[in-house]
Amino acid sequence: MQAVIRVVRSVGWTLIVAGCVVLLYVVYLLWFTGLETVTEQRDLADRFQAVTEAPAEATEEATEEPDATVEVGDAYAAMWFERDGERIVHGDVLYVVEGTSVADLKRGPGHYPDSAAPGQEGNLAIAGHRTTYGSPFGELAELTDGDTIHVVDRAGTEWVYAYREQRVVSPEDVWVVGHDPLETGTPTITLTTCHPRFSAAQRLIAWGELVGPAA
């Protein structure tokens, strides 16, 4: 009988320890990765500000070829979401990094290097985490008709996209970041994130269409 009790106690303590390990891991994912991203976002903000405040000659050159001087890992754009003039999805301005590797997306939303530049013909595609590393696209599913997506390019121009629709697809559906995913012929923005929360089984896609530069 004593042996049985010892076994039950041993199993019980093992389960408690395992539960604590899982809890600590969840805390790490949701809290400490967010702190890491806050630091990275500050760095990207400084880099982006340095670019947008560069002398006029450099800005004009960058405008001619928006992607020419952007290296993977560098600050690419700034973005935010609005509804009736109020910021939604994420409370802060999000600084977009060039690239969508695991390391890139730890820093913030990432621009697909082969996709269009802000405000240009084609499809501007940006990926972002939904639950970790600051959860930049944590509330992406809440976008609805009338919402707008604002993107500032490296020349300092603010471009406005009107939210159009969203869809859940498989990770293999790479057409969503293609040149014209909605087949409208209109410049488009595509935002991609994991679905459902805490899983990478599928992808949540949100699309918007270019309205033009901000008034």
Image: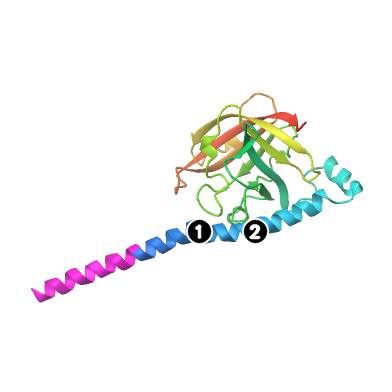
Judged left or right of residue 58, residue 202 is left
Q: Is residue 179 visible?
A: no
Residue at 65% over, 36% down = 149
Residue to which mark 1 is pinned: 31
Which segment did they paint magenta? Answer: 1-19
Q: Which mark is residue 108?
A: none
Q: Which residue is mark 2?
A: 40
Q: Nearer the viewer, residue 87 or 214?
A: 87
Residue at (61% x, 57% y) in the render:
38
Closer-to-camera residue (115/138): 138
For label 2, the SS is helix
x and y, in percent, of residue 90 in the image: 58, 44
Left or right position of 110 against 17: right
Compared to residue 152, the image places residue 187 above or below, namely above
Is-magenta flag for residue 8? yes
Q: Residues within 10 Å of mark 1 (few under 14, many from 20)?
A: some
Q: Position of residue 100 (x, y in %)?
A: 62, 50
Locate residue 170, reporting x and y percent. Answer: 48, 38
The answer for how far apart the CA atoms under marks 2 and 1 are is: 15 Å
* Residue farthest toward the bottom in the current orientation of the protein: 2
Q: Quadrant of the C terminus?
A: top right
Looking at the image, tell me whether mark 2 or mark 1 is earlier in sequence order: 1
> Observer-nearest residue: 40 or 122?
40
Q: Is 100 included in the stretch rendered in magenta?
A: no
Q: Say whether residue 193 is left or right of residue 15.
A: right
Instruction: Give residue 3's position: percent from left, percent from top.
Output: 12, 75
Amino acid at circle 1 = Trp
**Tag 2: amino acid:** Glu
Q: Main secondary structure of the magenta part?
A: helix
Residue at 70% from the left image edge and 40% from the top image edge? 151
Q: Residues within 10 Å of mark 2 (few under 14, many from 20)?
A: some
